[in-house]
Image: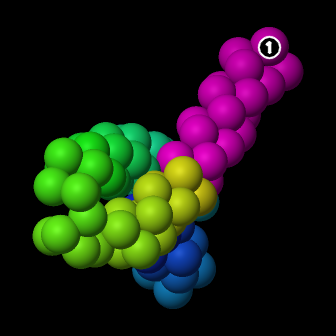
Amino acid sequence: MLGLVIPPAGFFAARELSRVSLVQATAATCVSAVLGAAAIVLARRGLRQIERTLGRVGGEATARVGRLLGLISLCLGLTAALALGLYALLNLFG
């Protein structure tokens, strides 16, 4: 969930605070990729634990939702990293 909260918070900070630029907010959004990858790994570990216990521990729906949110967060972070990389290339050659 934190990976999904970081991008709007960063862009809100860039809009409201004069010390934070849009480039810095986009760089902070790249952290979402790391948090999303961690969520996917933890969800996979949880699903494996559920399979090992034959579903007696419960939580399969929670693990699936965590995996979905992690995937969305990973995509947001990778998109921000791609945008930041293209911005750097444009500044370098333009």
For image coordinates 80% across by 13% down, the residue present is 93
Q: Which segment did they paint magenta? A: 73-94
Which residue sits furthest front? 54
Residue 8 is at least partly visible in this image? yes
What residue is rendered at 84% in x and 21% in y? 94
Q: Which secondary structure, mark 1?
A: helix
Dividing the picture into quadrants, the one containing residue 66 is: bottom left
In x, y percent, where is residue 10? 47, 69
With 59 as the anchor, is 52 left or right in this view? left
Residue under the image location 54 percent in, 52 percent down: 71
Count of numbered circles in the view: 1
**Is 91 on the left-hand or right-hand side of 10?**
right
Q: Nearer the viewer, residue 12 or 63?
A: 63
Which image quarter holds the N terminus? bottom left
Residue at 41%, 74% (x, y): give it: 61
Q: Is residue 58 magenta?
A: no
**Residue bearing the label numbered 1:** 93
Q: Dividing the picture into quarters, in which one does residue 88 lie?
A: top right
| Prevalent SS, magenta region | helix
